[in-house]
Amino acid sequence: MIKVANLTKIYKTHIKDQNPFKDVFMRKYKDVIALDKISFEIGENESVGFIGPNGAGKTTTLKIISGILYPTSGFVSVNGFTPFDKNPRFLKQIAFVMGQRNQLIWDLPATDTFELQKEIYEIPEHEYKKNVGELTEILDCKNLTSKPVKTLSLGERMKMELIAGLLHRPKIVFFDEPTIGLDIFSQETIRTFIREFQEEFKSTVILTSHYLEDVKKLSKRLIIINKGRIIYDGTLKKIIEQYSLTKRVTITLEKPANDTELRAIDIPIRYMFPKVVYKIRKSVLPEKIKAITQNLPFSDLTVEDETIEDIIKTFFRKNNE
Amino acid sequence: MIKFLQKNLRLFFLYSRFTLKTTLQARVGIVFFLAGKLFRFLFLLVFILLLFGKTKIISGYSLNQAVIFYLTFNVVDSLTQILFREVYRFRPLVVSGSFDMVLLKPMHPFTKILFGGIDYMDILFVIPYLFLVVLFFFKTIAFPYSIFNILSSLLIYILFLFNSLILASAFHIVVLALGIITTEVDHTIMIYRDLSGLGRFPMEIYKEPIRSLFTFIIPVGVMMSFPSKALFGLLSGQFMWYTFGISLSSFVFSLVFWNYALKRYQSWGG
């Protein structure tokens, strides 16, 4: 469905000179490699999360696959189309929902934007009504569509943005930071909606987000990009198995313990009575738990997996070594 | 192709409807906008009348003919403002990266960024301008003048107005393309407005080489003065062909430049 081979994107940026005269009349440029010969394939109905630090090349990849940007070199094919040809038949099959950009008409109600989308994507009247009805119901926002967009909150606007973007039932949906800036409740609503949308309409979902919770909940496959190169392409499960080498053990002590008693188990990562937190390697976890139960009187003990953020940090650290 | 044009035409009307809906929300703004336009028009009209109070002829043209030059400038200027108002709002779209959303749509981007913000307020002025052109035209002709001659003159005038709009489209497409490459729109559009403003008066008031510059290199004269000259029957057949040739080549150049700019679009703003 999506095939990318040796994709390269080079931006030309100007080097600032201390001398304003030179900066204007003898401007120098340098090439910045945003993508460096990346290759991957994405199949139908897959959900793929792109992650990486700022400037890694995630959004640039998505923008080339969707046809917004032209690549410097390389091959891209999406459903048999070359994206930057901007064939209307291709553009009708995709949607790009961006958390930081919007397409809603600011002064008018969202219904006007929906009507515009209906004409742009040539959606038949009955289908349009059905889609608006279904999407507003899933997002529980029927009462918001008639209010001017400028009066809506960020979370409410995002719901309208999702409806406007997905009205034409795209086969491929790109989500670029869909939950950015939203409160935890709105984030959860958006995640649930994306998951349900994909399950119901069998769309291919490609996502970038700095919130790893989004990736964890929405993507089975993970592509990690750093400095324009793919450094990991595989399942989320595999990366957790490979890089989640420790567990987080939190103990609620019954009475204060001294440094020697605490260090007898392991070096704690945090201690503030009554809580003490350890990060213990999985291989020695049973014996450490045994030592805790024998030496530290406690009222509660929890063992948790590392957070996805910690795992990715470990991954990057190991890759940089 | 016809289906594509029909769709983009439907979208054009829809965008226009939404622009009007948005405009009508700011009622005070409408009053000031219209008052400003009216004052500007009246001020220049008075200026021309005062000028002709001292002299009866400007570069070989009578007062009535000079008024037609001025009215034609206003017709072309207003029509371009009506049609291409959205160009003035292009910069924020580019610098914020919201232009991405336009490029992703299965429609021609010009439907939104060139024609997508019809300014209905200017339509209010075009109708009286055209009425005045016809009125002053009748004052310039020496009767007896056959109906056929009158109608053919007016038809040629309309044809040249249409030609001016093609040239104006080319100018605005170049402004959009420069906006993509440099993220600069406001100053470029002001340069266009200043240059086109030189066409308020017949090109003959300018000395060479400026006159040739604005006729052959930067075709402001072709855009603003030629419709009036055609109306007076002062354009030779050779110049007519030149006019259509330069409009067509400018338009083709603007499209080539636009495609060149699109390839350099960097999608700023994250």
Image: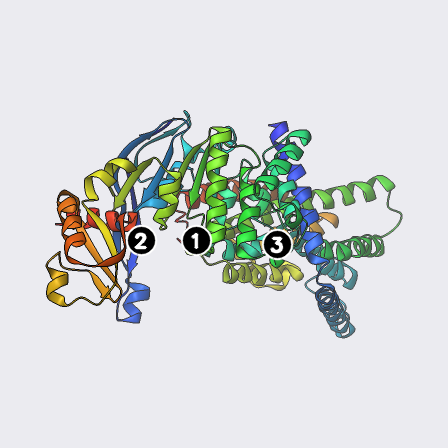
In the figure, A90 relative to B156: above or below? above
Which quadrant of the figure contains the N terminus of chain A? top left
Which residue in the rendered view is the most extreme toward the right? B144
The residue at 61%/54% (across/down) is: A149
* Disc 1 and disc 2 in contact, CB within 8 angstroms: no
In the picture, the disc for residue A149 is 3
Q: Position of residue A102 (x, y in %)?
A: 52, 50
Residue nearest the observer in this picture, A303 or B174: A303
Q: Which residue is mark 1?
A: A180
**Which amino acid, mark 2?**
Asn
Could you tell which of marks 1 and 2 lies nearer the N-terminus?
Answer: 2
Binning the other alpha carbons within 10 Å of mark 1 as few (below 14), some (14 to 19) or many (20 upward) gives: some
Image coords of residue A53 (percent x, y): 29, 51
Q: Residue at x 46, y 37 (%)?
A: A195
- Density class for disc 2 (Cα within 10 Å; few <14, some 14-19, many ≥20) is few
Q: Quadrant of residue B238?
A: top right
Q: Earlier in the sequence, mark 3 or mark 2?
A: 2
**Where does the image place residue A231, in percent across and percent down from the top left?**
22, 41
Residues at circles 3 and 1 in contact by the CB criterion of under 8 Å:
no
* Residue nearer the viewer, B180 or B224: B180
Mark 2 = which residue? A54
Closest to the camera, between mark 1 and mark 2, is 1
Cα separation between marks 3 and 1: 18 Å
